[in-house]
Structure formats: structure tokens, C-alpha cells
Amino acid sequence: MKYLRQLFIGIGFLLLGSLLVPSLTHANEGQSYEVYSSVLNVRGEPASDGEIIGVLSKGNKVMAFQEKYGWVQTYYGGHVAWVAKHHLIPVANTSQSSSANTQSVTTTDSITVTANSVRLRSGPGTDYNVIGSSSAGDTYNIVETNGDWHQIKFSNGSTGWIAAWLTNTSSTSEQSSEPINTSNNTNNNTPQSESLEGYTIVLDPGHGGKDSGAIALNGIYEKDLVSDTAVRVADELRNAGATVIVTRNGDYFVSLDNRASISNSYQTDAFVSLHYDSFPTIGVNGVTTYFGNGSDRGLAQNIQSSLASTVSLDNRGIMQRDFSVLRGTTAPSVLIELGFISNPNDLAIVQTAAYQNQVATAITDGLVDYFHR
Ligand SMILES: [Zn+2]
């Protein structure tokens, strides 16, 4: 009942919007929707058994590019994605369609770029052409937001798209009676001991979704352990000033090619893939850092040395191996095996918060050593 009412309100909004501002709807822009359910799975295919590639929550905005079988196609994390339409309510396309609505005001949303060498693209995804580049501190007005991407306006009047996670949004209302949104952080530009400031690190938590990775002696999955580790490592890298991009931030499948593509779509300074090892013989143990290309030996050495001096697990050293995720990335790249979950001693240690924190510190320190050597 409530759903229907919301739907009618939404449709009313849509009709009102299209009557008032017909000229604002460009040919390449679809209908905007708002997520109505508390949690909405984002899938790779327009089907209820399609692979889950992400999750949206109530109030998130979705821009539709096409519809099929009751599914709406949008973009998520730069990739084509589908959400079930019956969890969406339509909303008016732009904030300018406000004149007949008491709670709307003319709003100018702007973004500040938070990383250096951020690519500007012709559309909302990494599949689109690069049309320019932007630096930390640059500000732009937002034309619209589509999933994880903002369409922004340049001073010459043309537009382009930027990844939202490399920006901060601020909102200023011209006639609002409410206080201006205070969620934007004002200490962004306070440098501390930010030794990775200006560096973009792609963290790649191995496996996910249908690919559980190795299964530990106690039944836990490698994919879950690396997810936990990645969260801590990402925190530590951000504390050190780095821009961090993760190739997955939930339990869903990402192909090896896509992991490399995500990294290659940024001006990535280092790509770090996180794994836990497994071996049929229970006695094999220790931490290993792999590199593919000979030119990445130095990165592997810095990280492995830092790990070896920080964690209590055995140091197996660095090894060269032709992993496809390393081969596919253009940035310096390593794959770290953070202990054997087929070994009882390693397994007991790697599950502790202390170990996870040590790993986060060690990887961060290793990257600092690498970039400042
Ligand atoms: Zn693995």
C-alpha cells in the first residue's frame, strides 16, 4: 500500500518534471530512480540469478540507460549493472525542476577532486574514453550523478564524467531554510605524516562470490579472510595519505581481467593483490610476495622485507610467477600470500586482529619505502 503510494508520488513527480522542464532531458540521459528497498542487489545480468556485483541501499540514486524484462540497466563501479525495477521509484531528473514543489530548492552541488591525475571520461564508467585529467583540489559543479559517477561541467561549458569515490561532494542551497550540509570534511587539506599522499594504490582482495579461494582447516574461506585484511590495509593506506581503490568491497565475483582493468583505468602507482595460501602438505607455512614482471621485483622486495620484519610468520621471500592478474596490470604489481591457512600455526595467527593490523602496517610501510627509496 505504502509502496503504491510512493510509486504514484514518484510518477506524479516524473510527469510534473517532464511538463516543467522538457528541454532538460538529453537524448543520452535516462530516467532517474531512487532505491525504495532497504537493500537492493546490483547484478551483472537482468535476471534474479544474475551475478551480484554490488549492493545499493534505500535512497541511492540510479540512472537508467535501458530497461529489459523488468530490469533497469545502470552502471556500478564503472561497469554495466542491472537492478530490479520494482525496487525503484522514479524521481525527477534534475534539481532544477523545483518551482512547483515546496520542499525543493535550487541546489548547486559541487565536487572537489581528492586525488591527483584523476581521469575525466566521456561517460559514467571506465569503458568510456578519457577526455582529460584533473588534480586534487579542482572543483566542478555536478550536472548529474549516476551510480558511482558524477557528470561535471567545465568552465568552457562542456561536460565530462568523474569517479565519485575520488571526489568530495559539497552542497550549497541558494534558498534553503535548512542549514547547509555539514557532512563535508574540512580537514582534508591538513597534511600530517602523509607519506603516501598523491599516490593511488589499488588493493585487490582475491576471490569473492562463487570463488571462495582456498578453504582453511577450520572451514573458513580465503575470500572472507582477505576481505577483512583488505579493509584494514585500506584504512592504513588512507591514513598514510594514499588514494585507495579496491577491486571488490563485498562478497561478489570479479574476474581477473576486470581486476586488472579496474587498476588500469586509473593512474595507479601500485597494485597489491591479497591472498592466503594453501598447500596439500600441512607443514608448509609462511608469507610470500610474488611479482610477475622483473621490473616489479623492487616493489615485492620492499613489501616482503617490511612484512618479514613485522609479522611472526616465516619469511618465504619473494618469487617471480606469471599470475594473470599481475600480467594484466600496467602499474607495478605484486601478489601477497599472507600465510598458509592449510597450516594450523599460520591459521591461528592470521585470524587475529593483531596479525591483520601488522599486515596493514607492513604493507603500508613497504609501499612508503618503495616510493621514497
Ligand atoms: Zn588466493
Image (spheres, rainbow, N blue to C red):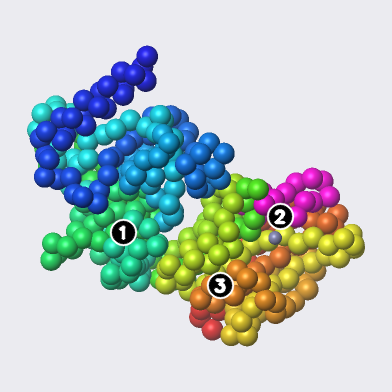
**Residue under circle 3?**
328
The mark closer to the camera, 2 or 3, is: 3
Q: Residue furthest top?
A: 1
x 53%, y 62%: residue: 258
- The residue type indicated by label 3 comes to Gly
The mark closer to the camera, 2 or 1, is: 1
Q: Is residue 356 above or below residue 286?
A: above
Q: Which residues are magenta?
A: 211-228
Secondary structure state at the residue bearing disc 2:
loop
Mark 3: give few (<14), some (14-19) or many (20+) Cα within 10 Å: some
Compare marks 1 and 3 and give the one earlier in the sequence.
1
x 11%, y 33%: residue: 19
Residue 365: % across, % down: 58, 70
x 14%, y 27%: residue: 102
Mark 2: give few (<14), some (14-19) or many (20+) Cα within 10 Å: many
**Secondary structure of the magenta portion, mostly?**
loop
Q: CA distance from mark 1 to mark 3?
A: 24 Å
Tag 2 near tag 3, CB within 8 Å: no
Secondary structure state at the residue bearing disc 3:
helix
Residue 53: % across, % down: 52, 47
**Residue under circle 2?**
213
Can you tell me whether the CB of the residue at mark 3 lies under 8 Å from the nearest atom of ligand 1? no
Query: Which image quarter: residue 188?
Result: bottom left
Determine if the magenta segment contains residue 212.
yes
Answer left or right for 20 relative to 334. Answer: left
Tag 1 near tag 3, CB within 8 Å: no
Residue 25 visible, this orientation? yes
Can you tell me whether the CB of the residue at mark 2 lies under 8 Å from the nearest atom of ligand 1? yes
Residue 170 visible, this orientation? no
Q: Is residue 5 above or below residue 206?
A: above
